[in-house]
Amino acid sequence: MPTIVAQGETIPAERLASFEDHSALRGDAAALQAQLADGGYLYMREFLPRDDVLAARADIFGRLAEVGEILPPVGDGIYSGASRRKEQVADLGAFWKSVCETWSLRRITHGPRLYGLMSAVFGEPVRAQDYLFLRPANRGKSTNLHCDYGFFTRTTESVLTAWIALGDIPVSEGPLFVVEGSHRFDDIVASQKGFDVARDTHRTAAFNATPLQFVEERGTRLLTRDFAAGDVVIFPMFTLHGSLQNVSEQNRVRLSVDVRYQRLDDAVDERYFGPSPTGTTGIGYGELVGAKPLTEAWHIR
């Protein structure tokens, strides 16, 4: 396995493993549900049509090329090292909202293919949050270790995250990782219960430990892999995860999107639904790291 970096630390081979491919379970709802409960994630290789994913990728990077952040050809996702976003865009949040509402992207995140899979995993009809977490990450950037509970469980704990690779993402470009078995860490679960990042501003969602420190202390591993365009990883609110550090020598930008699904009959958190969702903190799409020019640093709260 090539060199893998998380928060500036090289992860040794004994603390790494690859996601298992669960694509063979696709037509078996009971097996999908059992695997998710047991392993804390589902990985579906090339689940979404490659052409659809690459079309969305080109449309999104095309918008970033317009503000000087991506070089042509836009499908390659090469960072220019500069940005004119703040000079050209009056409202960064409105700009990012318009990018996240790109039709080719919504066809993926809210289309029948993913809806059918999520319905099978839940075992009943579902709905997707309208608010998307679209993440471009250039060289040097990563997402710290955290779980999603504090963001999305205000009205129901029965929420699942679907992470989608919007292009081929080798480990050098900083894709998703999850901590093996972390959904069963009772102390972590207990510490998260009742936590709301928007209300409990005295603490953050990110863990103090680096991914390497955490897996060494717990005697577990980081699960990751080279992803293909259209790969989907599904995980519940207590599964610890983050993204590896992008160390691309070609200055390629990693592009992925998170969308959350819940049962159709469960109460909705109005922050994430509707034509103008306000997001976690109430300021809409302007709160997201994607709303920042690629020239700026960011981290998860």
Image (tube, rainbow, N blue to C red):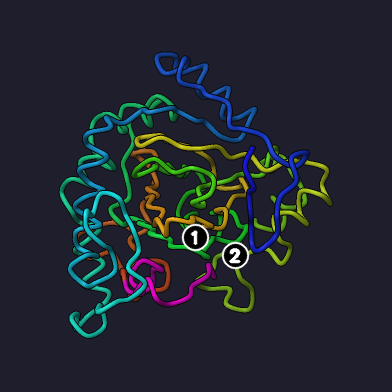
Q: Is residue 137 above or below residue 107?
A: below
Q: Would you say the magenta stretch is mainly helix, strand or loop?
A: loop
The local secondary structure at tag 1 comes to helix
Please rate how many residues cluster around mark 2, counting C-alpha atoms within 10 Å: few if below 14, some from 14 to 19, many from 20.
Answer: many
Residue drawn at the location 42% of the way across and 18% of the way down: 26
The image quarter in which residue 39 lies: top right
Residue drawn at the location 25% of the way across and 49% of the way down: 75
Q: CA distance from mark 1 to mark 2?
A: 8 Å
The answer to whether marks 1 and 2 mark residues whose Cβ atoms lie closer than 8 Å is yes
The image quarter in which residue 125 lies: top left
Q: Which residues are magenta?
A: 286-301
Picture disc at residue 137: none
Instruction: Tell me if residue 288 is in the magenta stretch.
Output: yes
User: Which residue bears the numbered disc 2?
Assistant: 205
Q: How far across and down, in percent of the image, does residue 29 sit?
A: 44, 18
User: Which residue bears the numbered disc 1?
Assistant: 151
The mark closer to the camera, 1 or 2, is 2
Specify the amino acid type for callout 2.
Ala
Residue drawn at the location 45% of the way across and 54% of the way down: 155
Q: Earlier in the sequence, mark 1 or mark 2?
A: 1
Q: Is residue 197 left or right of residue 164?
A: right
Q: How far across and down, in percent of the image, does residue 301 sit?
A: 54, 70
Instruction: Tell me if residue 124 is in the magenta stretch.
Output: no
Which residue is nearer to you in this view: 109 or 276?
A: 109
Specify the amino acid type for callout 1.
Phe
